[in-house]
Amino acid sequence: MTPAGSIGAGVLSRRTVLKGMAAGGALLAAGPAGRALAASGRSIRTAGSRPYPHIPAGTDTLPAIEHIVVLMMENHTYDSYFGMLPQGDGFAVVKGRPVNANRDASGQVVRVTHASTTCQNGNHVSQSWDASHRCWDGGRMDGFARTNRGSMTYWTGDDIPFLWSLASNFTVCDRYFSSVMAQTYPNRRFLMAGSAFGQVGDPFPSPGDKPPRPAGTPSTIFDLFNRYDISWKDYFADLPTVGLFPYVLEQNPGNVVPVASFFADCAAGTLPQFSLVDPESFEGSEENPQDITVGQSYVARVVNAVMSGPKWGSTLLVFTYDEGGGYYDHVAPPVAVRPDGIRPEASITYGDLYSRYGFRVPTVVVSPWSRPGAVSSTVYDHTSILKTVETKWNLPALSARDANANDLLGCLDLVSKPLAIAPALAPAPAPTGVVSCLAANPTGPLP
């Protein structure tokens, strides 16, 4: 279901981001994706390389974009939310109904089914390393029904009208993958540092934990922001994402602020150059077994605050999800460049040494320069956000993964006149609340 006006991989022909030095050892460490890059005539780049090596690091190469905002929600695949979206690569549809299916543990065919409620009650889904790889099943994408009860569920524009309106008015990415087939914390580490550093689950970090990188080497994007005087904040409701790297939280207390400050900064036109916006984790992140209307209402507040603020004309907002949450998706994650030499801390790796992306997640690039109603089918993951930031300020890559990632600028039309007035989006339905969902599913999600 890809429209004629979609954006394909052809936008990459104008870029220079994949030019650079490559050594045989780096290619071996990068895995199949690195060797594929070399075979295509494009050399693999290494950690520390800059998008524009002949100009100083910290140079602003995109002054029209003054603010980058990242809103990352939780635990849904592209198909679970956008499988029935009129544009993009969603379900195979026959006579108006999707026909995608898996077999469950008993061998019965289970087709994808429209959810009967916005509560995720009864959906016992797991996005653990093992469960995710069993769902993937070597790329066959046929293990969801036998691994996760309720995983073959999807929602439509009647359930999530604001999100569908967002996708229809801006550029939706139908090849945006999570960074790793695992849970929240490893994927959010990729967002901030270009690597999970061995993590495959969600253990809470210990105070003083710091990524195992050489002394003097920046560990996260926030270290680079501080080094090059780029302003930033993590706006949080209850759990700040930067807390996954406790040293960042400890060293930058003034940069981690309640989300109420985000709405105030939007209205006052005082957003920093980079903003990370976190949802409330218990009711408002959309994780199973929450009522997804609560999270959708939060997304609407954040997006509308940006669009109605005085800095809308110079802002790029990336709306995405950290990982798939155990829900079905039909597109097999492709191979990826290994970020570094650190292996995942898993008893069974399934041949995945951080050398394959995770499942697709719903992603929309929101900006006055975004292409209305278009689809980008370029391969992205969370390190594409890093690469976009690195391209704007010519920053050195944190790992081989973000060094070789595609930035998100192909989702924009930076030549035409930007959209001065933000479009009117469909309202988010009034949230019904998480209490009724928990009552219907008291055990919550699987670990």
Image: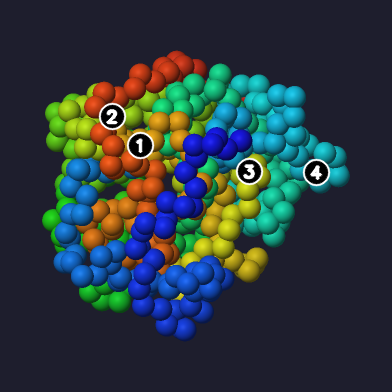
Q: Which residue is drawn at 73% across and 38% down?
A: 100
Task: Give coordinates of residue 242: x percent, y percent.
Answer: 31, 51
Task: Give coordinates of residue 120: x percent, y percent.
Answer: 60, 30
Rendered image quadrant of residue 386: bottom left
- Comparing labels 4 and 1, the label whose residue is closer to the camera: 1
Q: Mark 1 points at which residue?
A: 370
The alpha-carbon separation of the residues under discs 3 and 4 comes to 14 Å
Residue at disc 3, secondary structure? loop
Residue 219 lies left or right of residue 73; in this view the side is left
The alpha-carbon separation of the residues under discs 3 and 2 comes to 33 Å
- Answer whether labels 1 and 2 touch (C-beta < 8 Å): yes
**Residue 329 numbered mark, or none:** 3
Q: Is residue 434 above or below residue 139?
A: above
Q: Which of marks 3 and 1 is nearer the N terminus?
A: 3
Q: Which residue is drawn at 35% across and 48% down?
A: 409
Q: Which of marks 3 and 2 is nearer the N terminus?
A: 3
Nearest the camera: 157 or 422?
A: 422
**Residue 419 numbered mark, or none:** 2
Inspect the image, locate mark 2, and give the three-letter code of the amino acid beneath it.
Answer: Leu
Residue 256 lies left or right of residue 347; in this view the side is left
